[in-house]
Amino acid sequence: MRRANPWILLERTTRPPAVVERHGLRLAAAARAALDMARRELNPRAIAEILDAVVSARLCTPADLREELRVSSRRGTALVRQALCHLYPT
């Protein structure tokens, strides 16, 4: 992990995110970005808020989050998986 500046966190990945364009900006899909952010969080309430925010804003669905979790690295996802099951039980 390297920090380019206080606001940017660079990580190596074997699975670069698909790029989506929104308002002229090239971004990672909302599900991927939310899960990457949530994986770094240690507070379960903050994790739930991150996941709920992207779903409430209709940027992705709970199914999108589950699929992204399924295909992503399992590193750092235990609390994220718990929060997702709690918020959106299947």
Image (cartoon, rainbow, N blue to C red):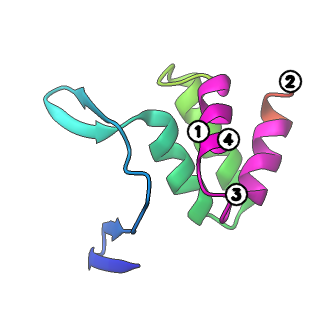
Specify which label sits upstream in the sequence, 1 or 2: 1
Magenta stretch: give its range: 62-85
Q: Residues within 10 Å of mark 3 (few under 14, many from 20)?
A: some
Say which quarter of the image contains residue 13.
bottom left
Say which quarter of the image contains residue 46.
bottom right
| Residue type, numbered disc 3 | Thr
| Residue type, numbered disc 1 | Glu
Q: Position of residue 6 (x, y in %)?
A: 30, 75
Which residue corresponds to the image point at 78% horizontal and 58% vertical from the top-left?
A: 78
Residue pointed to by mark 4: 70
Discs 3, 1 touching: Cβ within 8 Å: no
Residue pointed to by mark 2: 90
Q: Position of residue 50 (x, y in %)?
A: 59, 44
The dot on residue 68 is 1
Q: CA distance from mark 1 to mark 4?
A: 5 Å
| Residue type, numbered disc 2 | Thr
Q: CA distance from mark 4 to mark 3?
A: 10 Å
Q: CA distance from mark 2 to mark 4?
A: 14 Å
Element type at mark 4: helix
Which residue corresponds to the image point at 51% horizontal and 55% vertical from the top-left?
A: 37
Q: Position of residue 40 (x, y in %)?
A: 57, 65
Specify which label sits upstream in the sequence, 2 or 4: 4
| Residue type, numbered disc 4 | Arg
Element type at mark 3: loop
Discs 1, 4 touching: Cβ within 8 Å: yes
Element type at mark 2: loop
Residue pointed to by mark 3: 77
* Quadrant including the C terminus: top right
Q: CA distance from mark 1 to mark 2?
A: 16 Å
